[in-house]
Structure formats: structure tokens, C-alpha cells
Image: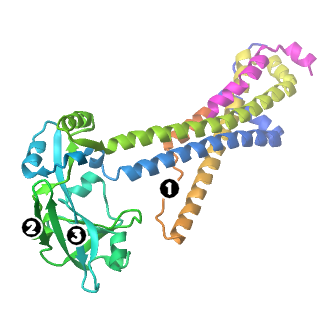
């Protein structure tokens, strides 16, 4: 009989035949691979979730990533004046400069008997964007909306509610500008009672009130620090070097982000190694299944070859069967890992809401990694079936019948 190639449809039917004949063994093999791939997906999703949470807390705005905070060393006892701010704005690669005035002051409210002593920042509205600071609820002030942003500790100190009920409550304040270098002291106060526009709910943040220069009768003429935004990520180092040459101490959020990314990448790799260990175990199990399947089907190989199947047909038949098994193992692993991660996310968010915390996502699964997992599972399936497929292709019809 002339040799001929099996058609694709015939290949699939013959490959799926073993699933029907040995369903329990096939299901257990696929389940073993699914568990291995599920563990990999679960752990890598955890690593990505940790990276997202950590970096997300560091970078709340795109501009904050290319912004640096600069100040003179404390022992220098120097401050920034308006002429210094103008010089910084004229530097190459500097897109924006926001001066920050830090003073202590008293804040009062009509229903509160005693004023509260808090730290105060007098800044332009752009401060929030460059510093990456955002209220938990409410909004920030702008050139058209006069108001203040406070921390929850400030509200507690004043005896006000630390919820949305604090919004729009009018407050007044007085501030003392003291410049030890010039030996001058200026006492100023709010132009009028201004409303609370936003609240930063962070119990670790000290009592703080952030207000615009327009909210006080006398705006500050000197500043303790500045926020300097570079025009791109590539020029951050150039601007940093220029500021350092001027004797300033510079801290950039991008440094924290890079360090955080390095830490989370290491965590993800370690978690991935544990997952790959489970994957190797499941791959060995699949290899064992394919070897057993080959030993049980030598007679079938002999029949196929006696009917005209070529060595390539037999090899492809075993490889296709192992690839299908690997595909289902990968798909099952994606389902197991993804559902397990989403289940934990749901449970943690329910717990957080009951305890009064904010919802968060601990497990994040990138779509590209899902595709990579399924593709890798097919490759591992083919590799596991390569040796049995080679043995089967080299087996002659006579040897196959004799080994039965």
C-alpha cells in the first residue's frame, strides 16, 4: 500500500481518541498541569499586584514622576526668595517651579472654643499635581475656588468629623512668618473664613493645612523648599545635577519608583521560581503519561503504519495529542490562577469595607501573561511528547505487532 499523509481532520480525531478511551488519566494529567500553571499565574499576579500597589502609592500623577523637591541643607539656614525662584525657572530643561512655604499657625472654627496649632503649607494649586498629593475625598483649591485642604489629624484636633461632613465647613487661621536669617517676623491671617475643600485621610500624616497665597492677607516672601519639574524623564538627571551644583539637597520621586520596581521585580522573580517548580513537577507527570500512552498504543501504531501512515504522520499524531493536552492544561491553569486571585481580591475588599478601609487590588493578571501562559503550556506539552513521538515514529509495523 502506498504511503500517504493523514489529513488534519484525521489527525485531530485520532489525537482525541485517547481522551475518550482513557478519560480519567487524561483529565488527571490535564489537572496536574493546570495546578502547576495555576500556581505560576497566581504567584506572578501577586507580584504584579504588589508592584502596582507600591508604585501606585508613590506616583499618583504623571508630573510627580519627573518632579524633584529641592531645599538648602538645614545647617545653611537659607531660604528661597522670589528672585531665586525666577532663576530656577530660567534653568534649561526646567518646565515648572512651585515654591513651598512651611510655617506653623493656628486654625479656628466658629463651633470650636480653642484654636488648633498645626503646620501650614502655602502653595500654588499646581503643588498637588507636582507633589502627587490628592485628597481622599473632596477637591483641591484652584485660582477660581478659594479654600483649604486638611489632613484627618487636623480635623480630629479641631473636633470636626473626619468624613465628607467636614467639607465646606468654614475655617479661619493666623500664621507667623519668621525668618531667622533676616531676623524678621510677620504675623498674618486669613482674608476671610474659607471652606474646607478636601481631606487627606491618613492617620500617619501630622496635622496639616494646605492653602493658597490668596487666602492670607500677606503672602509669604520667602520659601523653605521648591518643587522643580523637569520637561521629560530623560532630563531629570540633568536638572538634578544643576540643582546639586547650586548647593541644594534634591530628592526625586523617580528614585523611589526605581527602587520600588527593583524590589517588586525581585519578589516577582522569587514567586515565579516557586511557581515554575510546581510547573516542572506537572510537566514530568505529563511526560510519564505520554510514555505510558506510547507503550499502550504500539499495536495502534503498527495498524496505522500497515495502513499507509508515514513516520511523520505518527510523530505528528503524538505531538498533536500532547499539544492539545498542554493547551487544556494551560487554559485550566489560567482559570484556576485567575479565579483564585479574584476570589482573594473580593474577600480582601469585603474585609476592607467592613473595617472602614479603602478597596484595593492585590492580584493583577496582565493579559499578555495569560497569552504567554497558554502558549508556554502548548510548548511544554509538545516537549513532553517529543520523545514518545520520536519512538513511535521509528517503530516499524512488524516491531509494533511483536511488542503487543
**Toward which corner of the image does residue 110 lie, by quadrant?**
bottom left
Camera-side residue: 306 or 58?
A: 58
Query: Residue 179: percent from the left, percent from the top?
Result: 14, 58
Query: Residue 6: percent from the left, percent from the top?
Result: 70, 23
Give the CA separation, mark 1 to mark 3: 39 Å
- Mark 1 — residue? 361
Camera-side residue: 347 or 399?
A: 347
Disc 1 crowd, CA 10 A, few/some/many (<14, 14-19, 20+):
some
Q: Which residues are magenta?
A: 377-404
Disc 3 crowd, CA 10 A, few/some/many (<14, 14-19, 20+):
many
Q: Where 206 falls versus 107 (above or below)?
A: above
Q: Are marks 1 and 3 in contact (CB under 8 Å)?
A: no
Query: Residue 49: percent from the left, percent from the top?
Result: 50, 49
The label shown at residue 218 is 2
Camera-side residue: 271 or 239?
A: 239
Res 44 seen here: yes
Is residue 269 highlighted in magenta?
no
* Mark 2, secondary structure of its residue: loop
Give the CA separation, mark 3 to mark 2: 14 Å
Residue at 62% x, 40% y is: 40
Query: Reading the chain from its start, which is encountered first: label 1 or label 3?
Result: 3
Q: Are marks 2 and 1 in contact (CB under 8 Å)?
A: no
- Mark 3 — residue? 105
Q: Where 365 falls versus 219 (above or below)?
A: above
- Quadrant location of the N terminus in the rendered image: top right
Q: Is residue 103 left or right of residue 344?
A: left
Query: Residue 2: percent from the left, percent from the top?
Result: 75, 13
Give the CA separation, mark 2 to mark 1: 45 Å
* Overall secondary structure of the magenta section: helix
Residue at 14% x, 77% y is: 192
Amino acid at each position: 500500500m502506498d504511503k500517504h499523509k493523514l489529513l488534519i481532520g484525521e489527525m485531530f480525531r485520532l489525537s482525541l481518541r485517547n481522551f475518550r478511551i482513557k478519560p480519567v488519566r487524561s483529565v488527571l494529567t490535564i489537572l496536574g498541569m493546570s495546578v502547576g500553571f495555576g500556581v505560576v499565574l497566581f504567584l506572578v499576579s501577586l507580584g504584579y499586584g504588589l508592584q502596582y500597589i507600591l508604585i501606585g502609592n508613590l506616583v499618583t500623577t504623571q508630573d510627580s514622576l519627573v518632579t524633584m523637591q529641592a531645599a538648602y541643607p538645614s545647617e545653611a539656614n537659607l531660604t528661597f526668595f522670589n528672585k531665586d525662584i525666577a532663576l530656577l525657572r530660567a534653568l534649561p530643561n526646567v518646565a515648572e517651579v512651585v515654591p513651598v512655604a512651611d510655617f506653623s499657625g493656628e486654625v479656628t472654627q466658629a463651633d470650636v472654643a480653642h484654636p488648633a496649632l498645626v503646620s501650614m503649607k502655602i502653595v500654588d494649586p499646581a503643588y498637588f499635581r507636582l507633589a502627587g498629593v490628592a485628597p481622599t475625598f473632596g477637591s483641591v483649591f484652584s485660582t477660581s475656588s478659594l479654600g483649604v485642604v486638611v489632613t484627618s489629624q487636623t480635623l480630629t484636633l479641631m473636633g470636626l468629623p473626619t468624613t465628607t461632613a467636614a467639607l465646606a465647613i468654614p475655617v479661619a487661621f493666623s500664621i507667623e512668618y519668621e525668618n531667622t536669617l533676616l531676623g524678621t517676623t510677620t504675623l498674618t491671617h486669613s482674608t476671610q473664613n474659607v471652606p474646607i475643600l478636601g481631606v487627606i485621610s491618613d492617620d500617619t500624616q501630622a496635622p496639616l493645612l494646605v492653602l493658597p497665597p490668596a487666602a492670607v492677607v500677606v503672602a509669604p516672601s520667602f520659601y523653605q523648599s521648591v518643587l522643580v519639574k523637569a520637561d521629560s524623564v530623560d532630563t531629570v538627571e540633568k536638572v538634578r545635577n544643576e540643582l546639586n551644583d547650586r548647593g541644594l539637597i534634591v530628592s526625586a520621586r523617580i528614585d523611589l519608583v526605581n527602587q520600588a520596581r527593583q524590589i517588586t521585580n525581585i519578589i516577582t522573580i522569587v514567586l515565579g521560581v516557586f511557581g515554575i517548580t510546581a510547573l516542572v513537577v506537572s510537566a514530568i507527570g505529563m511526560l510519564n503519561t505520554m510514555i505510558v500512552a506510547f507503550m499502550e498504543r504500539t499495536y495502534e501504531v503498527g495498524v496505522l503504519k500497515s495502513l499507509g501512515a508515514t513516520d511523520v504522520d505518527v510523530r505528528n499524531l503524538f505531538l498533536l495529542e500532547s499539544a492539545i493536552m498542554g493547551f487544556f492544561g494551560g487554559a485550566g491553569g489560567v482559570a484556576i490562577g485567575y479565579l483564585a486571585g479574584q476570589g482573594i481580591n473580593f474577600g480582601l475588599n469585603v474585609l476592607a469595607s467592613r473595617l472602614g478601609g479603602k478597596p484595593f487590588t492585590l492580584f493583577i493578571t496582565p493579559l499578555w501573561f495569560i497569552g504567554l501562559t497558554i502558549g508556554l503550556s502548548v510548548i511544554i506539552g509538545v516537549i513532553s511528547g517529543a520523545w514518545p513521538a520520536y519512538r513511535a515514529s521509528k517503530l516499524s509495523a512488524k516491531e509494533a505487532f511483536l511488542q503487543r
